[in-house]
């Protein structure tokens, strides 16, 4: 944590009367974990703070402490607009561009509040006055932990804050197995366990609460819809809205699906395409050097990290897949 930034934040927190914490569209475990950890910490420090999300997030993330106080911009647009207008500080967590907030981004961009970015994605836009950014951090939760420590708050990390932080560390590292995991990650985890986070309970809450249909959708995706191209070291899965409806799709049901092809020997690049909300949501994952952040930025109006990125396509499913096939069949395309 840069001392200059920590000092600027200390000054801001001393004078700020109200803070808003925002995170990206379709919040995941790291987005909600980091936002709620910061919310619980600020609240404990007697600071007024509110977490605002652009849209709904999966049921399996609703157990986290502080969840009941989260405001959803889609269901309460006026309340959120007023809150952001009045805020002295807006913390932007786990995203690098206002585009990731969709409509909520316009409100945050307009607001006169000091923006505090806490994020680990590549190439953040320069919208924040105070910046805590490290692409080497395994998760935004790792950065929030570091920040709380830098603010002198280590002693205030309790079971609630620890459980939120543990969740983001767990979900963004594929349960502590991606290349982003370091000795430091495990030292933080050890501290979180000492503060009261209970790993088996958190893993069960997030990973063992599936509806039967979610598992059936996974089976369908792998047995019927996965296209494997061993000579190109890649595989991809696509799901239409009809298929999702057939398996009574609930938000979050396709999370993690994109990782499965990477467990095939020799596959180093995986793609996932799903028809949702009138567009095609795109996800990419890789192992090793193939940069999916670059790929998603270049071809699918997205971005993310070197080994995990997402984006979207306004074409229909067939056209999107054709576009993808054209790109990967270019002579200079190579998965390394
Ligand atoms: P996922 O595939 O799980 O949705 O996202 C993988 C990573 O890419 C996450 O870190 C996420 O924040 C980022 N990401 C997902 N979708 C988009 C997008 O549309 N634009 C950008 N810039 N990043 C995305
Ligand atoms: Mn993250």
Image (tube, grey):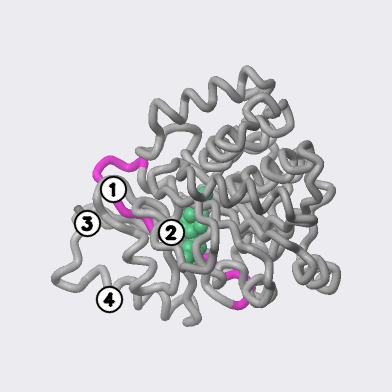
Q: Percent position (x, y) of residue 168?
A: 58, 40
Q: Nearer the viewer, mark 2 or mark 1?
A: 2
Q: Percent position (x, y) of residue 166?
A: 60, 33
Q: Is residue 18 left or right of residue 105?
A: right
The residue under label 2 is: 304
Q: Nearer the viewer, mark 3 or mark 4?
A: 3
What segment carries the magenta color? 263-278
Q: Quadrant of residue 106?
A: bottom right
222 part of magenta stretch:
no
Q: CA distance from mark 3 to mark 1?
A: 9 Å
The residue under label 3 is: 335
The residue under label 1 is: 267
Q: CA distance from mark 3 to mark 4?
A: 15 Å
| Cβ atoms under marks 3 and 4 closer than 8 Å | no
The answer to whether mark 2 is within 8 Å of ligand 1 is yes
Q: Percent position (x, y) of residue 280?
A: 52, 72
User: Who's the residue at 68% across and 40% down the image?
Assistant: 37
- Whichever of callouts 4 and 2 sits on the residue coming sooner in the sequence is 2
- Whichever of callouts 2 and 3 sits on the residue coming sooner in the sequence is 2
Q: Is residue 106 left or right of residue 224?
A: right
The residue under label 4 is: 326
């Amino acid at each position: 944590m840069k001392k200059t930034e920590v000092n600027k934040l200390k000054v801001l927190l001393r004078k700020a009367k109200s803070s808003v914490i925002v995170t990206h569209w379709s919040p995941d475990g790291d987005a909600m974990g980091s936002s709620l950890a910061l919310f619980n910490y600020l609240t404990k420090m007697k600071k007024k703070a509110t977490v605002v999300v652009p849209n709904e997030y999966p049921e399996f993330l609703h157990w986290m402490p502080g969840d009941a106080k989260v405001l959803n911009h889609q269901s309460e647009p006026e309340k959120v607009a007023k809150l952001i207008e009045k805020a002295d500080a807006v913390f932007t967590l786990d995203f690098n561009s206002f585009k990731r907030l969709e409509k909520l981004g316009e409100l945050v961009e307009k607001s006169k509040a000091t923006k505090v970015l806490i994020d680990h994605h590549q190439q953040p836009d320069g919208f924040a006055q105070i910046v805590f950014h490290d692409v080497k951090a395994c998760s935004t939760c790792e950065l929030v932990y570091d920040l709380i420590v830098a603010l002198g708050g280590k002693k205030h990390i309790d079971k609630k804050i620890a459980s939120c932080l543990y969740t983001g560390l767990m979900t963004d590292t594929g349960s502590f197995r991606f290349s982003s995991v370091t000795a430091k990650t495990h030292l933080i985890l050890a501290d979180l366990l000492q503060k009261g986070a209970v790993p088996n309970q958190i893993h069960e809450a997030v990973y063992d609460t599936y509806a039967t249909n979610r598992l059936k959708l996974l089976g369908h995706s792998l047995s019927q819809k996965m296209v494997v191209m061993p000579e190109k070291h890649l595989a991809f899965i696509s799901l239409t809205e009809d298929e999702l409806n057939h398996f009574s799709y609930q938000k979050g049901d396709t999370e993690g699906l994109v990782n499965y092809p990477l467990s095939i020997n020799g596959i180093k690049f995986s793609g996932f395409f799903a028809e949702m909300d009138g567009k095609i949501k795109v996800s990419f994952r890789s192992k090793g050097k193939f940069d999916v952040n670059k790929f998603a930025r270049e071809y699918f109006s997205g971005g993310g990290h070197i080994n995990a990125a997402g984006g979207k396509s306004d074409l229909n499913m067939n056209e999107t897949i054709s576009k993808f096939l054209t790109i990967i069949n270019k002579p200079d395309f190579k998965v390394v």
